[in-house]
Amino acid sequence: MRKLNLDRYDDRDDIRCNLIESYDRLMNFVEKHLSDPFFLEGDIRVSIRNKLFREIVANILIHREYSNPYPAKFIIEKDRVITENGNKPHGFGEIDIDNFTPYPKNPVIARIFKEIGWAEELGSGIKNIKKYSQIYANSKPLFIEDDVFKTIINIKEADKKPPITADKKPPITADKIIEFLKQNKKITNKQGREITGLSATRVKEIFKLLCDENIIVAHGGNRDRFYTLKSEN
């Protein structure tokens, strides 16, 4: 990680072990140093950060050219994440995400990762990275093919932690609550139940998540409690 000390690093993990342990250690590094903005699929909170970077980590391990001595790198900077990986190129320059032909590089490794649920069909990785990058940081990933394959993800928007909703889903409860607040300035637990149709317990859980993400602010005691948008305070 290079956010403060650009000449050396703020933190690092030199990974020299099998691919299963490598995957776990890389994900631990991601979870340690990258924010995880609020995200709901339906009414369930999921980690969109992990969805994105599991794809990136799996791609590093599956598609590396292991005869290439260049060390694989996963670099976290202040406003972007860069991966560099030894590669046997089938072209050169930036990849057109919407119009590319995937090539199997390590099919045995790919099959193992697919069996344990860490990978899908050939070519799905780049498409999923594009999808999750746009949700996580509102940015399009950049893939550059050369003797060293590079992936660049702009992450500066992720630290703002906006309320994010899953694409191709009907309006979800967090959206309804936030929209209500924009129009009415404050909301009570009772109003939350009325506009979402959810139980009191579930509405309180959603309010708590929004408070934890600094999107709304709670005021008053249990019976008199109400919430306002953080931006209104």
Image (cartoon, rainbow, N blue to C red):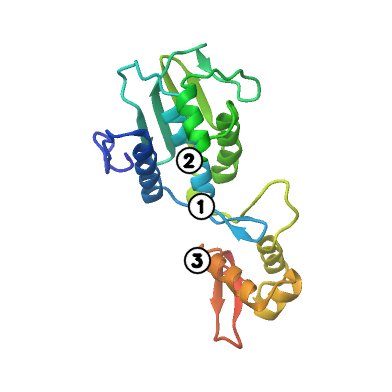
Mark 1 or 2 closer to N-term?
Answer: 2
Mark 1–mark 2 Cα distance, whole angstroms, equals: 21 Å
Amino acid marked by disc 2? Arg
Residue 209, quarter of picture: bottom right
Identify the residue position indicated by label 3 in the image: 212
Q: Nearer the viewer, residue 43 or 110?
A: 110
Foreground disc of the pair 1, 3: 3
**How far, Cα to Cα, is label 3 from label 2?**
24 Å
Amino acid residing under circle 1: Lys
Q: Which residue is mark 2?
A: 54
Categorize mark 2 by other alpha carbons within 10 Å: few (<14), some (14-19), many (20+). Answer: many
Q: Which residue does the image show at 42% across and 32% down from the upper left?
A: 82
Camera-near label (1 vs 2) is: 2
Of the 4 image quadrants, the one containing the C terminus is bottom right
x, y percent for residue 69: 30, 18
Q: Residue at x 49, y 46 (%)?
A: 50
* Residue 36, numbered circle: none
Q: Earlier in the sequence, mark 1 or mark 3?
A: 1
Local SS, label 2: helix
Q: Which residue is mark 1?
A: 160
Residue type beneath disc 3: Asp
Q: Are marks 1 and 3 in contact (CB under 8 Å)?
A: no
Please tell me which of labels 3 and 2 falls first in the chain: 2
Q: Is residue 184 left or right of residue 1?
A: right
- Residue 209 at least partly seen: yes
The answer to whether marks 1 and 2 mark residues whose Cβ atoms lie closer than 8 Å is no
**Foreground of the two, 217 or 74:** 74
Near mark 1 (Cα within 10 A), the count class, few <14, some 14-19 or many ≥20, is few
